[in-house]
Amino acid sequence: MSNKTKILMAEDHKLMRVGLKSIFEDYDDLDVVAEAETGIEAVKLAKELKPDVILMDIGLPELDGIQATKKIKEFDKNVKIIVLTSHGEEKEVNDAILAGANAYALKDIKTEYLVMVLRSVKDGAVWFDPNVAHLVNKNSSAQGATRADFRASHANLTEREYEVLKLIVDGKSNQEIADELKISEHTAKAHVCNIIQKMLVDDRTQVAVKAIKENLI
């Protein structure tokens, strides 16, 4: 049991919760430890149970999923939060990212793909649904950022770190980065830490968002 990924589902529609729980029961490494029907309940259960991953709907009663994400991240920066919602508007996507969400998925995602995203995010990856990823950098052209500008402003990144950065934006975990570049996971993690420090951000989610917004990728 200790090796399983502990999942908290924050979703007010019972049918959705039942469906997801049924799906996750088919995977030996996944364990739904609790279900929350409101944002306030999600915050309470997150504090009590310390799950590894939270599946967070946006349209929760009492406290919406974005505010719940923000509150949870205030006391637990390590928990991974996947926003799973039917909402795909620009403001909601960016508000979720600013609140600390590690991934943003729409509810029409294929279940086997959701499982893959869940596992990757648990291991440290960030992920944006392809249908909303373009909203993150929608204003990059208006900001006048170019790839050359970005590289000039982050000239202290090595070529290897640029390779790692691209894989971070692609949603790869440390292990997946290691496999792709044929390096050890420890080395991959060290590169990620260096990138976070050099780009003056707090975590790999902010690295990905900043790279997208500043038009590196």
Image (cartoon, rainbow, N blue to C red):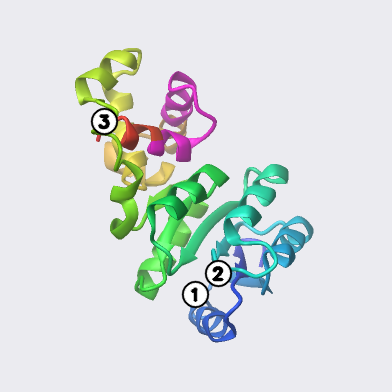
Q: Which mark is residue 214?
A: none
Amino acid found under the numbered disc labelled 1: Tyr
Looking at the rendering, the stretch of residues picked out in magenta corresponds to 190-209
Q: Distance between the residues labelled 3 and 1?
A: 37 Å
What's the residue at 39%, 32% (across, down)?
Answer: 210
Q: Residue 27 carries which label?
A: 1
Q: Is residue 205 magenta?
A: yes
Amino acid found under the numbered disc labelled 2: Leu
Image x and y of residue 143, in percent: 29, 28
Q: Main secondary structure of the magenta part?
A: helix
Q: Name the residue under label 2.
A: 30
The N terminus, quarter of image: bottom right
Instruction: Determine the residue located farthest toward the front in the rendered image.
Output: 142
The secondary structure type at the circle numbered 2 is: strand
What's the residue at 56%, 46% (across, down)?
Answer: 99
Q: In this view, does 199 lie above or below 84?
A: above
Image x and y of residue 42, in percent: 69, 64
Q: Are marks 1 and 2 in contact (CB under 8 Å)?
A: yes
Between 101 and 21, the one nearer to me in the picture: 101
Compare marks 2 and 3 and give the one earlier in the sequence.
2
The C terminus, quarter of image: top left
Image x and y of residue 5, in percent: 58, 62
Amino acid found under the numbered disc labelled 3: Leu
